[in-house]
Image (cartoon, rainbow, N blue to C red):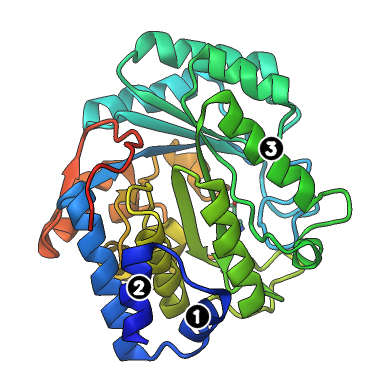
């Protein structure tokens, strides 16, 4: 197993069969080893600095009905909200003062959040905060719409592909949604010039090792600048309420595999991982993650943006908890960086 981990670090890829072995036969000691290797690669590229992104959850309306997601259209039990431009700009103001230089505008695919409105919001943030990066995470849009937002000043876009396997995709999403369309969106985003993020939920219902290998190989080809990997966590008001969550170990293993394959990618220790385990964020960083995304949404709305049960949004997971986050990072030898943290092409060698 160790020799494959060394090979993965050196050659940045493996044969499918070798990935399969790694994914099926990774015991606690092997996991520690690959996490350590991935942490070293992350340290080589980023030092002990962790980039922070202020997450603003702009709307929990969604036209989609993804089986795993708490803000799916078919959930009648959540109160829907949509932030006004003023409220979003207030979040940015608060975030800027705290040191954030990236704002992530995330939301459901909300028909009420029109292209005009999003464009106006991006223009306003770009004007008021010329030194900040604007990341959008608003789902699938036509090419022209992505282009408009880019021209308005957005720099990055997050759109996890969730799974590259079409059959598995159709087990996670209703028939109106397609894996092909999502992948096309990702290619469009890259072509337009966004720093693009993709990724998966680990342990989603129906996911097999074969699917994970396909995800790894897809991401290897796409070469996204950002890779988001978090455990699946059930939400009580979804069709997947009774499914078990993904595990910390499998999430950390995949995180490390992606770090070894993509040394300069921006990889967050996700909120889902921090929700699953009290030390999830730290363990993510020690397995190769180099980004955290504290919640900058208005306090009153945070509970309503529940993608899965018990989603963390307070303490070190919140923008106002930055001091606590700093302390936690210090305890494992890391520091917050208030740089914008754009993707940089690889310059170092292993
Ligand atoms: N568990 C874990 N992650 C989830 N997401 C949505 N619902 C869940 C869930 N139940 C993730 C998806 C989406 C991102 C914004 O949140 O991967 O892309």
Find numbered disc 3 in the image and state the secondary structure of the residue it sits on.
Answer: helix
Q: First in sequence: mark 3 or mark 2?
A: 2
The residue drawn where x is 57% and y is 61% is: 217
Comparing labels 1 and 3, the label whose residue is closer to the camera: 1
Nearer to us of marks 3 and 2 is 2
**Residue 169, percent from left and from top:** 75, 61
Do we see residue 80 in this rendering? Answer: yes
304 horizontally vs 116: left or right: left
> Looking at the picture, how far across and down is residue 266, in whole percent?
37, 47
Question: How busy is the neighbourhood of tag 3: few (under 14 within 10 Å), some, or many (20 plus)?
Answer: many
- Graded by Cα atoms within 10 Å as few (under 14), some (14 to 19) or many (20 or more), the crowding at tag 2 reads some
The quarter in which the C terminus is drawn is bottom left
Are circles 1 and 3 on residues that touch, CB within 8 Å? no
Q: CA distance from mark 1 to mark 2?
A: 10 Å
Q: Which residue is mark 2?
A: 7
Disc number placed over residue 185 in the picture, else none: 3
Query: Is residue 118 something that shows in the picture?
Result: no
Q: Which mark is residue 268?
A: none
11 or 280: nearer the viewer: 11
Secondary element at image label 2: helix
The residue furthest top is 127
Asked which secondary structure carries label 1, the reply is helix
**Which residue is farthest right?**
175
Q: Are marks 1 and 2 in contact (CB under 8 Å)?
A: yes
Query: Residue 44 in the image: x percent, y percent?
Result: 18, 54
Decide which of 315, 210 is in the foreground and name it.
Answer: 210
Q: Is mark 2 within 8 Å of ligand 1?
A: no
In the image: residue 51, left or right of residue 82: left
- Marks 3/2: CA distance? 32 Å
Q: Residue at x 23, y 52 (%)?
A: 349
In the picture of the structure, the residue carrying the numbered disc 1 is: 18
Residue at 72% over, 45% down: 182
């Amino acid at each position: 197993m160790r020799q494959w981990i060394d090979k993965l670090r050196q050659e940045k890829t493996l044969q499918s069969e070798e990935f399969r072995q790694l994914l099926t036969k990774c015991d606690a000691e092997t996991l520690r080893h690959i996490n350590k290797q991935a942490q070293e690669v992350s340290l080589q590229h980023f030092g002990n600095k962790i980039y922070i992104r202020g997450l603003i959850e702009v709307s929990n309306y969604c036209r989609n009905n993804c089986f795993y997601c708490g803000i799916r259209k078919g959930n009648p039990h959540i109160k829907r909200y949509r932030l006004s431009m003023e409220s979003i700009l207030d979040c940015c103001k608060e975030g800027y003062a705290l040191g954030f230089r990236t704002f992530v505008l995330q939301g459901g695919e909300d028909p009420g959040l029109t292209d005009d409105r999003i464009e106006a919001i991006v223009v306003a943030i770009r004007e008021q905060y010329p030194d900040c990066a604007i990341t959008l995470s608003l789902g699938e849009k036509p090419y022209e719409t992505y282009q408009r937002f880019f021209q308005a000043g957005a720099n990055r876009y997050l759109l996890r592909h969730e799974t590259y396997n079409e059959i598995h995709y159709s087990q996670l999403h209703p028939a109106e949604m397609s894996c092909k369309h999502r992948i096309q969106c990702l290619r469009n985003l890259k072509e337009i010039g966004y720093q693009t993020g993709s990724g998966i939920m680990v342990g989603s219902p129906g996911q097999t090792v074969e699917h994970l290998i396909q995800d790894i190989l897809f991401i290897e080809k796409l070469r996204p600048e950002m890779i988001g990997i978090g455990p699946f966590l059930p939400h009580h008001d979804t069709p997947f309420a009774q499914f078990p969550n993904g595990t910390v170990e499998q999430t950390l293993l995949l995180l490390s595999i992606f770090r070894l394959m993509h040394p300069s990618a921006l990889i967050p220790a996700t909120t889902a991982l921090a929700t699953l385990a009290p030390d999830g964020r730290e363990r993510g960083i020690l397995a190769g993650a180099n980004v955290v995304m504290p919640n900058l949404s208005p306090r009153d709305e945070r509970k309503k943006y529940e993608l899965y049960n018990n989603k963390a949004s307070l303490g070190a997971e919140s923008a106002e908890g930055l001091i606590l986050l700093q302390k936690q990072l210090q305890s494992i030898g890391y520091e917050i960086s208030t740089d914008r943290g754009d993707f940089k092409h690889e310059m170092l060698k292993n």
